[in-house]
Image (cartoon, helix red, strand yellow):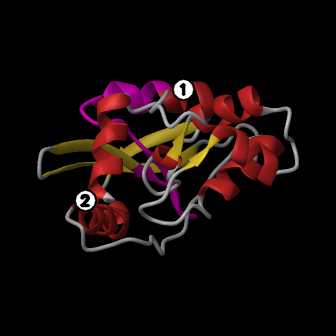
Amino acid sequence: MNVHQKETIYYNQLSMDGWTIYIAATEKGLCFVGSQEAGYDEMKSWFERRRPKAFLIEDLNKVLIYKEQLVEYVRGKRKIFDLPIDLIGTEFQTAVWDELQKIPFGETTSYSDIAEQINRPTSVRAVGTAIGANPVLIVVPCHRVISKSGRIAGYRGGIPMKERLLQLEK
């Protein structure tokens, strides 16, 4: 992509069963799943910081497949997502996000376990930071990472959203 060229991002709001989340996708795949009740401003701000060449266009048809799979997940009819994602991050972040996608539905792991699995056992805090930068909540299941003690810690979507997702998977 030309450095001066805008990147088109299609978005829409997902509202069902008490959930209100913004989702966004490029032609390559899902690139953003927002926090519960955070609204358009969270998404706009995220793109301004992380993908500043993004040009946001509201278009339900372009995000419909992603929306359908998220609805199926929230309603307990889907455990595995099979859709393309378009993640942009550092090599370290990408390694962490790839590892998150290996955590099975209904299971949890710890930040230190993720650090071990990517062969960076002393990088537990950096793993937490990379998880916090995950742009695709739910689909890249960072909600399945808890502290070694079993405590539910940090989540971009907030602790209530994380608890709700973990409960949904029980």
Q: Amino acid at mark 1?
A: Glu
Q: Where is residue 25 shown, x and y percent of the image?
A: 46, 55
Q: Which quadrant is home to the C terminus?
A: bottom left
Q: Is residue 120 above or below residue 68?
A: above
Q: Tag 2: residue type?
A: Val
Which of the two discs, 1 and 2, labels the residue nearer the N terminus?
1
Residue 68 occupies quadrant: bottom left
Pointer 2 local density, CA inside 10 Å: few below 14, some 14–19, many at least 20: some
Q: Residue at x 57, y 61 (%)?
A: 103
Q: Nearer the viewer, mark 1 or mark 2?
A: 2
Q: Is residue 18 on the magenta stretch?
A: no
Outermost residue, front side: 149
Residue positioned 33% across, 59% down in the render? 169
Res 52 visible: no
**Residue drawn at point x = 37 percent, y = 64 percent:** 66
Secondary structure of the residue carrying numbered label 2: helix
Q: Quadrant of residue 80?
A: bottom left
Marks 1 and 2 sit apart, C-alpha to C-alpha, by 28 Å
* Residue 122 drawn at (x, y percent): 86, 32
x%, y% of residue 134?
57, 41
Name the spot of residue 5 as percent of width and height, x first: 66, 43
Question: Taking 72 as reference, is 112 left or right?
Answer: right
Q: Is residue 55 left or right of residue 62?
A: right
Instruction: Give, as a single range, the part of the protein colored magenta.
Output: 24-45
Q: Residues within 10 Å of mark 1 (few under 14, many from 20)?
A: few
Q: Name the residue that disc number 1 marks.
A: 48
Is 99 drawn above or below residue 93 in the view shown?
below
What is the number of callouts on the image? 2
Residue at (32%, 39%) from the top-left corner? 163
**Residue that protrudes farthest toward the left in the picture:** 17
Dot label at residue 74: 2
